[in-house]
Amino acid sequence: MKKLILIAFVILSAFCFAQTKSILFIGNSYTYFNGGVDVMLKNISLAEGDTLYTESLTVGSASFSTFCNNPETFNRIRSRAWDYVVLQEMSSLPVTSKDTFLNSVEILCEEVRDTGAVPVLFATWA
């Protein structure tokens, strides 16, 4: 009987703690090149026995400003209950165009938070 209770506890624990997380990636070629950061993270997750749902919205050389002016960005953010939205800016803009970066990242992070997701900034080298 004790073994049966232990087995039931282990199975229930697995269902309670092994939750599928969902992550949306928004960025440019640093996000999609080499098969995509989303796919790499999904594969690592699967190798660890976890389930991860990912999607990406990527445009080569795009900046946060580009995404702020694209209605598809906001449609995709609102398309499901994401746990996290990873935002990747054009690598040099936080340094060379600080005001543009700050205005755009504020808009995107506010939109993400309004949906209940957590914004995550993916910084690349400048």
Image: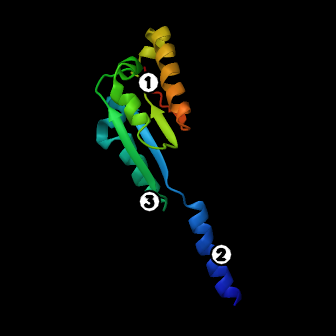
Q: Amino acid at mark 2?
A: Phe
Q: Earlier in the sequence, mark 2 or mark 1?
A: 2
Q: Determine if residue 91 is in view.
A: no
In the image shown, does 86 or 126 lie closer to the viewer? Answer: 86
Circles 2 and 3, Cβ within 8 Å, touching? The answer is no
Along the line of sight, which residue is nearer the eye, 19 or 94?
Answer: 19
Asked if one can make out residue 66 in the rendered structure from this viewpoint, the answer is yes
SS state under label 1: loop
Q: CA distance from mark 2 to mark 1?
A: 46 Å
Numbered circle sitting on residue 9: 2
Residue drawn at (53%, 20%) of the image? 106
Q: Which mark is residue 125?
A: 1
Nearer mark to the viewer, of 3 and 1? 3
The residue sitting at 48% across, 62% down in the picture is 49
Taking the spot 38% from the left edge, 41% from the top edge, the residue there is 37
The amino acid type found where label 1 is placed reads Trp
The residue positioned farthest toward the bottom in the image shown = 1
Image side of residue 49 versus residue 36, left or right: right
Q: Earlier in the sequence, mark 2 or mark 3?
A: 2
Q: Nearer the viewer, mark 2 or mark 3?
A: 2
Q: CA distance from mark 3 to mark 1?
A: 28 Å
Disc 3 element: helix
Query: Is the C terminus in the top left, top right, bottom left or bottom right quadrant?
Result: top left
In the displayed structure, 124 sits above or below 16; it is: above
Callout 2 touching callout 1 (CB < 8 Å): no
Q: Which residue is mark 3?
A: 47
Rate crowding at label 2 as few (under 14), some (14 to 19) or many (20 or more) other CA atoms within 10 Å: few
Estimate the x, y position of residue 77 in percent, counting from the top left.
Answer: 43, 35
Q: Secondary structure at mark 2?
A: helix
Image spot of residue 43 (x, y percent): 40, 53
